[in-house]
Image (tube, rainbow, N blue to C red):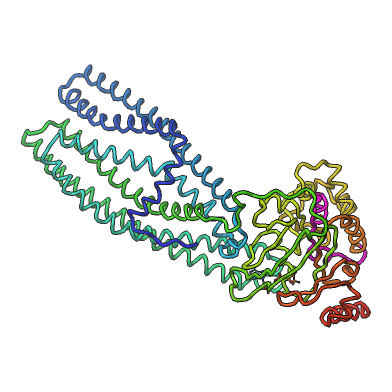
Amino acid sequence: MKTEPQDPQSALKSLLPIFALVKQYKWMALSALLALLLTAGVSLSLGQGVKMVIDQGFIAGSAEQLSQTILMLVAMISLLAIGTFVRFYLMSWLGERVSADLRKAVFEKIIYLHPSYFEENRSGELMSRLTTDTTLLQSIVGSSFSMALRSALTLVGGLFMLLLTSFKLTLLVLASVPIVLIPMFIFGRKVKKLAVSSQDAIADIGTYAGEIIQNIKVVQSYTHEAQEQGAFSGEVEKAFNVAKQRIKQRSYLIAAVIFLTFASISIMLWVGGMDVLEGNMSGGELGAFVFYAIMVAMSMATIAEVYGELQRAAGAASRLLDLLKVESAIVDPDQPMSLLAQDVMNQPVISFNNVSFCYPSRPDVPALKNINLAIYRGQTVALVGHSGAGKTTLFELLQRFYDPLSGRIEFSGCNITDISLTTLRESMGMVSQHPVLFSSDVWHNIKYGKPQASEADIKNAATQAHANEFIDQLPQGYASFLGEQGVRLSGGQKQRIAIARAILKNPDILLLDEATSALDAESEFHVQAALKTVMQNRTTLIIAHRLATVVHADLIVVMEQGEIIATGTHTGLLESSSVYKRLCELQFDKANKN
Ligand SMILES: Nc1ncnc2c1ncn2[C@@H]1O[C@H](COP(=O)(O)OP(=O)(O)OP(=O)(O)O)[C@@H](O)[C@H]1O
Ligand SMILES: [Mg+2]
């Protein structure tokens, strides 16, 4: 999801929608703007104060007048302090608020996206959208924007005051403006381009480190620490080199702007000093003039700096907005059909009709070819076949993680694309091939199946999944923290928690993908017994390599290379399918050797 750098104008345009987010806090924003106007106004009038202090205090030699003007100066400065407090607080508040809103919006978008999106876009990149990019925008809304606005105001106001003081000197200032702006455009463009690749490089680092940390045991077991270290430092150096180029361009920019502005000021001072010496100007006027000239110079420098930052943020904004614009490929129908409470007798509850499918990342290799299969309510259907045959894919299509390329899948007589995703998925309970646990305690992980479940329900489900016993032995029982992705449990324990979760959900259709593969013979026996009760009066699809567990299924479906090559019962298939027979022979052979 890399975004090409755009030209500066459209880049800044891409920030506009971000400011649209500020709209809902318009009172905050208006008050901040008012405070900003006030502070800019006060800063500008400070120059007049300086002039009065010099002309009426020092030059007139009156102590009383000096005290008065100083008092006035203090009053103005107090006003400036109060205004700055309000402006800073409100602007920063807005920045934080907008980035919080953006984070929520991005996450809300991501969580509903079709799963294949995550095969094409790496999680580290998405993570950096949520954190780095939103933080960048927070600094834009919260500080850079207000700095730019304040500087623009003082720039215009300062120029105006200069004009009032001396027309000739102001012409000099105006002549120097384009000289300062030129480097801003030349270097700003480069900074923007480099900023985008810099952020991409940072995202790469995150992805890389995330993967290594997650698989730390594999890395150490293969003693790949040194290689991984080398590869990682390669990524880091790549990011550093891009950043180095970016800061070099920015340093040039800042240095050029500072030199050019202060050089012009020096020239003005010289010209102005001549005027005072000739008596065309008072000392206070020159003082005020210098004050305003410095103010104008600082404003310009700030604008130059902020401009670079705006460019950087524009990259972040356009990437965030791109992400917010992605449409999920799997969406609810406009008018979802409601399922009949009771299906018509003799009508399959699930049917695959001529379903073919390729994974989006592998469009040339069909994962499923012409699948036709009817499953009736209450049946236990087993899917068997070699690894890679397409068994798990069938489950994924049934839950509509992907839509078939051709053909249709029906649930209770409705095409699943006509049913709301919630209805469809609520009817199904899945125990996946690799049980997935969240970094939380046992309660949370089982309760995931049914958030409103009571403690008794949860314990009951755990007991049915034969998980109760080991959970009770954990240090804090059901409140034990299981570690990230459940690392503190054994494979079989994780599986039983996942089974308990599905049992708690109490779905119409149970989908078990190798649900008992990680269990020892004893636990498997118990879980099989548990599943048997759970499977009663429930439609169950079960994928299993261990054929002993599927011998009693009502229907066994043999798959090979994305196709159904035979269906029938155990005894029937032993006769009719050579592939099934071979699978059985291999298993019994293995069993005999054990
Ligand atoms: N996300 C994916 N993107 C691209 N191809 C995929 C994806 N998931 C699976 N495949 C491919 O689709 C084919 C079917 O995979 P599937 O996971 O359905 O096999 P399976 O029958 O469940 O195998 P196993 O018994 O090993 O679990 C395989 O060739 C696999 O490489
Ligand atoms: Mg599988």
Question: Residue at left 75%, top 52%?
Answer: 427
Question: Residue at left 27%, top 23%?
Answer: 70
Name the one closer to the observer, 383 or 567.
567
Name the one closer to the observer, 524 or 360.
360
Image position, residue 288 (x, y; %): 20, 33
Question: Residue at left 76%, top 64%?
Answer: 433
Q: Is residue 506 magenta?
A: yes
Quarter of the rendered image showing ligand 1: bottom right
**Is any atom of residue 466 visible in this view?**
no
Instruction: Identify the magenta region.
Output: 498-522
Image position, residue 396 (x, y; %): 70, 63
On the rendered structure, is 431 left or right of 589? left
On the rendered structure, is 1 left or right of 464? left
Image position, residue 536 (x, y; %): 89, 56
> In the picture, residue 302 is in which quadrant?
top left
Name the one closer to the observer, 288 or 468.
468
In the displayed structure, would residue 568 be above or below residue 185? Answer: below
